Image (cartoon, grey):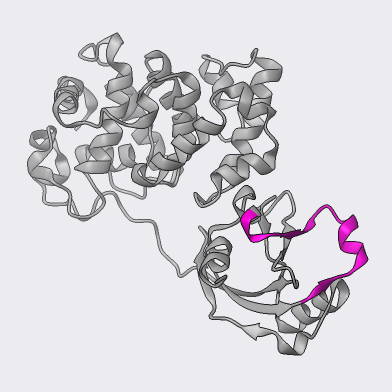
């Protein structure tokens, strides 16, 4: 089946959206380019229900693109703390600065210029342009890939370049339909995302409620569970590390800023080492105290996109040595100051739950 075989695809989808779509998302009121852009970045790898409160907190603190560009990176990361995939926040900050430098402090409307911004790929740029300005551009996020794979019966893992090329050709054909009014591109873009998020879900899709069910290849052929084709799987590797929770007599916690690249880049976390021996060596090089009295806490399991990490926390009373005061990447932090720092979610949870 091709996109040309179903000319009423857009009209049926829009009719469903008018009744059943999501119309009360925080970035829709008002729907400005900055708010749309921020929401699209937050919604990469994150569901709406999780992103919504973070979005509101973020725009309350940084209501404009220029505010974001002028903010220290630490402030941006603190606002992002808990959302995960922190490269998104760093790219957002870098993109805002570039917009100030190159585009007069505004997001560029040109699709190529949008795509050139850090953290903005082809689909994200199209989602921004279509929702912010009603420009006619097709999107292909995870939800749309799933809808298109089922509706058109496309076999093969959607992340493969050859399959993704087919899917792009289909969404481009749909968005070019004369049945899609120019003034409704923003609604059409949201409708596609809503359909995938609420009806055409990964498991247990509500096909009986779907406005596209009559022409859906997967439904007609009984292949809903097969499509889209899953990613060829292999078990992610398991890694281990120790984290050192050093606390002084005042109850301050020693925090270390991660390097500007790599996992948890630029975030503040507990000093981390490969094993217990390295943790002891680090302690002796930076702190004074009775390391033998260190308390071993329950391990923390955390999953990244490409591997699993088990952290073994060691909590110990310690005192600083003079050189810490001269190190910008080491800081003694009082408990009530932790909220002002960008801290990885598992570390923040550890400090919160065990900190009583």
Given residues 67 and 253, the one toward you in this image is 253
Going 77% across and 85% down the picture, which residue do you hit? 291
Given residues 94 and 247, the one toward you in this image is 247
- Displayed quadrant of residue 231: bottom left
Q: Where is the C terminus found, in terms of image quarters?
A: bottom right
Whether 329 is drawn above or below 94: the answer is below
Query: Residue 100 at x, y = what percent?
Result: 67, 19
Residue 321 on the magenta span = yes
User: Can you see residue 257?
Assistant: yes
Query: Residue 95 at x, y = what percent?
Result: 63, 29
- Displayed quadrant of residue 23: top left
User: Can you see residue 120?
Assistant: no
- Displayed quadrant of residue 144: top left
> Does residue 33 appear to the left or right of 240 in the view shown?
left
Going 87% across and 74% down the picture, which residue do you hit? 285
Q: Which residues are magenta?
A: 318-336
Query: Residue 272 at x, y = what percent?
Result: 70, 69
Going 50% across and 31% down the picture, which residue do you hit? 60
Q: Where is the N terminus found, in terms of image quarters?
A: top left
> Does residue 80 appear to the left or right of 39 in the view shown?
right
Whether 106 is drawn above or below 278: the answer is above
Query: Residue 281 at x, y = what percent?
Result: 82, 79
Whether 139 is drawn above or below 236: the answer is above
> Does residue 105 appear to the left or right of 154 in the view shown?
right
Whether 289 is drawn above or below 186: the answer is below
Residue at the farthest front position:
250
Residue at the farthest bottom position:
292
Numbered label tally: 0
């Amino acid at each position: 089946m091709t996109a040309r075989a179903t000319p009423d695809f857009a009209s049926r989808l829009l009719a469903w959206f008018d009744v059943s779509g999501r119309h009360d998302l925080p970035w829709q009121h008002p729907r400005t380019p900055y708010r749309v852009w921020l929401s699209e970045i937050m919604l990469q790898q994150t569901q709406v229900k999780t992103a919504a409160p973070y979005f509101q907190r973020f725009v309350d603190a940084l209501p404009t693109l220029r505010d974001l560009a002028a903010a220290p990176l630490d402030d941006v990361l603190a606002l992002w703390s808990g959302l995960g995939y922190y490269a998104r926040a760093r790219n957002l900050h870098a993109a805002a600065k570039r917009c100030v430098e190159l585009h007069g402090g505004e997001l560029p409307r040109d699709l190529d210029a949008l795509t050139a911004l850090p953290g903005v790929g082809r689909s994200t740029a199209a989602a921004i342009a279509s929702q912010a300005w009603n420009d006619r551009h097709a999107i292909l996020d995870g939800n749309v890939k799933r809808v298109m794979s089922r509706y058109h019966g496309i076999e093969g893992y959607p992340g493969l370049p050859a399959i993704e090329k087919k899917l792009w050709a289909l969404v481009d054909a749909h968005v070019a339909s004369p049945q899609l009014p120019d003034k409704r591109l923003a609604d059409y873009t949201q409708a596609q995302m809503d359909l995938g998020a609420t009806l055409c879900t990964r498991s247990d899709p509500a096909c009986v409620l779907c406005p596209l069910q009559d022409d859906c290849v997967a439904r007609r052929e009984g292949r809903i569970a097969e499509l889209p084709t899953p990613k060829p799987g292999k078990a992610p590797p398991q890694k281990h590390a120790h984290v050192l929770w050093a606390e002084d007599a005042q109850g301050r916690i020693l925090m270390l800023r991660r390097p500007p690249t790599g996992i948890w880049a630029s975030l503040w976390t507990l000093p981390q080492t490969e094993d217990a021996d390295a943790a002891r060596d680090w302690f002796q090089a930076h702190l004074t105290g009775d390391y033998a009295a260190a308390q071993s806490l329950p391990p923390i399991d955390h999953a990244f996109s490409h591997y699993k990490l088990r952290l073994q926390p060691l909590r110990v009373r310690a005192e600083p040595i003079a050189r810490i005061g001269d190190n910008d990447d080491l800081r003694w932090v009082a408990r009530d100051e932790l909220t002002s720092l960008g801290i990885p979610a598992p570390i923040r949870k550890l400090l919160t739950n065990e900190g009583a």
